Image: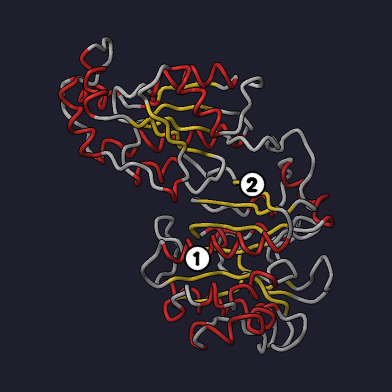
Amino acid sequence: MGTPSPELVRVADKAAMARAAADLLLARIAANSGRIAICLTGGSSPKQLYELLATDAYRDRIPWPRVHWFIGDERFVPPGDPLHNMTMARSAFLDACAPPANIHPIPTDTTDPEDAARAYERELKTFYGAEQLDAARPLFELVLLGIGPDGHVASLFPGFPAADVRDRWVVGVDQAHVAPFVPRVSLTLPVLASCRTVLFEVGGADKRPILTRVLAGEDLPANRARSDHQTILLIDAAASPETSADQSTSGLPQALIIMGVAGSGKSTIGKALGERLGWRFEDGDSFHPPANVAKMSAGHPLTDEDRWPWLRAIAAEIARCRANGEHIIIACSALKKAYRDILLDHHHDVRIVYLEGSRELIGDRMVHRKGHFMPTGLLDSQFATLEPPGACEHPLTVSVDAPVEAIVDGILQQLHVSQDRA
């Protein structure tokens, strides 16, 4: 499917940005039960995040013995110098919380930046346990980045050779091209991309001009630093450009997934809701490969192995719509939470609409239904598989024991859409 488009998450201010970043970092740590590597960044933007991680509310939720802390770039100055990135992180939270052996600074006591780069590359490869990166096994769980005023990330400056290096993990940068004008050491773009999540923090009115250029798609290191899995831009109100490409301020989600067992009326409700909102509707069944359709038509239930390609195809269409600012409604059974996790992919602007109904009610509907390839005999299998969405998924739940228009009215009410507007 290629590299997913970045997710834009807007927050009110830098304090809200720090909380959102901390919550995401904790979620990424919780998703991995093994040894974890986090790549930090320097600059002023992450300082509030680092200080927040040292508070009891966050500190007590981090399994410090199995989390290792690296850094994406360093200014070639001695540790303890006010310009030293890892010194800031250590002062804010690492020295008070993390085991010393789990803190991995770039050495700046070497003869020059290139020597430091070679030493840090050896350390990263030793930690990773291989000489070459494997896309299926990311080096980092999360990489934290900022965006420089010229669009640089880490110490990879636009138009300069280090930003194009792909055969090394770490490079020395003899000359910085923005203040402070000191030599640097930086991870390369392929290494920064070797992660589950790239998280940008972009805050303050001074970032609005460069963020406008980044969102316009200009060829900058900030637009080339992308995870193959997930890239998020956390943007506060001061930095957020006011462009036509921005998400609507209406508070509506970008995509709605209408879920429920076969016979609950997903397509009927989805079409009616699309007409009321003026959004495009797609039936998730159209994303099934032919082999799945044939299997269901023959009365055989699908396995999870059958469903993964189908769910990924739907997720890809949602990602495409989000990237283009399009609204979409998709009917998809999404009976298990694991299926919905693929579709939602941590996007707050993708919501689940759960059509809830009893076995007796939906069974009666199936008996009278024609022209659909899901035989009535598979309904018991559907209910056995169903995992109703929990509160953590923030579903919009409506009963199907009502006329179509009343069900759509209930959904719009939960979306806070006035009936006049719809």
Q: Along the line of sight, which residue is nearer the eye, 239 or 356?
A: 356
Q: Is residue 255 above or below residue 11?
A: above
The type of residue carrying mark 1 is Leu
The residue to which callout 1 is attached is: 26
Q: Along the line of sight, which residue is nearer the eye, 225 or 407?
A: 407
- The label shown at residue 8 is 2
Q: Residue at x 62, y 63 (%)?
A: 19
Q: Name the image quarter holding residue 295.
A: top left
| Residue 180 image point, x, y percent | 83, 73
Q: In this rendering, would 25 be left or right of 79?
A: left
Q: In this rendering, would 339 be left or right of 316?
A: left
| Residue 233 image point, x, y percent | 64, 52
For mark 2, does the 10 Å Cα neighbourhood hold few (<14), some (14 to 19), or many (20 or more) residues?
many
Of marks 2 and 1, which one's residue comes earlier in the chain? 2
Label 2 element class: strand
Q: Is residue 340 above or below residue 357?
A: below
The type of residue carrying mark 2 is Leu
Mark toward the viewer: 2 or 1? 1
